[in-house]
Amino acid sequence: MIRAAIAALSLIAPPAGAAECRLALALALDVSSSVSATEDALQRRGLAAALLAPEVEAAFFASPLPVALSVYEWSGRYNQELLLDWVLISARSDLQAAAVTLARSERGTQDFPTALGYALGYGATLLARGPRCLARTIDVSGDGENNEGFTPRQAYDAFAFEGVVVNGLAIKPPGEVRDVDLEVYYSREVLHGPGAFIEVAAGYEDYEAALRRKLERELRPKAIGLLGTTE
């Protein structure tokens, strides 16, 4: 099953040209069946707004080396869709164009479960064909645990995750009670690599603020100091 997934994901477009950048950042949005249309709209608008927040913009341009940005949505095993292919954020106009693209994006599907392992495998393949940056990070957000296909840990064993950091944004509606705490689940099963961390959003209404905090932290140039270490 995992080998078949690797073969399918390898069919993503051919490698982009080499680029000098300090960070390749792939953002992954949950569009599984547990996410309502209203929540999805909050997520897309929140992402666009977070990218243009003054503190996030300052973090993007805190170093002479640019950041390469890519965004995709995910849900079931074979339901990943690229919303923004790799773009170098070298100027404010690049960031504004990316935000407009994402704000105008439309959800590709809403009928499939939560295949986190496949989402991570897609992200690893996306990074592998992306620009050659000093560091590589996947920022995956979601509101539930893996319930289809191979697990995140199996994805880390099967795909090329050496030198890749995976951070998590767990979306937990206030007062929600479930058998497995989502923050604990993400911390135990999803986080990967040196310095990996989790941010928690108190529901989709809090997504923009949580993502803003997360992006600011991920984009800090001092994170480059972690290069050379492995999990």
Image (tube, helix red, strand yellow):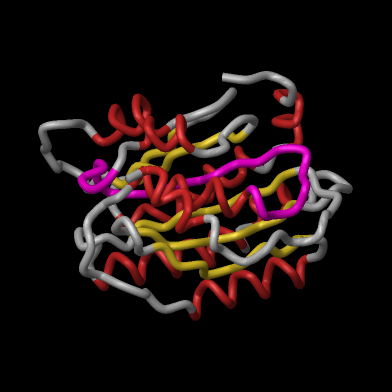
Front residue of 225/13: it is 13
Residue 113 as seen in the image, left or right of residue 205: left
Viewer-closest of 124 and 61: 124
In this view, the residue in front, 151 or 56, is: 151
> The magenta stretch spans which residues?
128-149
Residue 163 drawn at (x, y percent): 64, 31
Q: Residue at x 80, y 60 (%)?
A: 17
In this rendering, is residue 226 above or below 11? above
Q: Nearer the viewer, residue 73 or 39?
A: 73
Q: Position of residue 8 (x, y in %)?
A: 45, 58
Instruction: Work out whether residue 6 can be spotted.
Output: yes
The residue under the point 86% across, 50% down is: 20
Q: What residue is drawn where x is 76% and y is 72%? A: 93
Q: Majority secondary structure of the magenta segment?
A: loop
Residue 23 occupies quadrant: top right
131 magenta-colored: yes
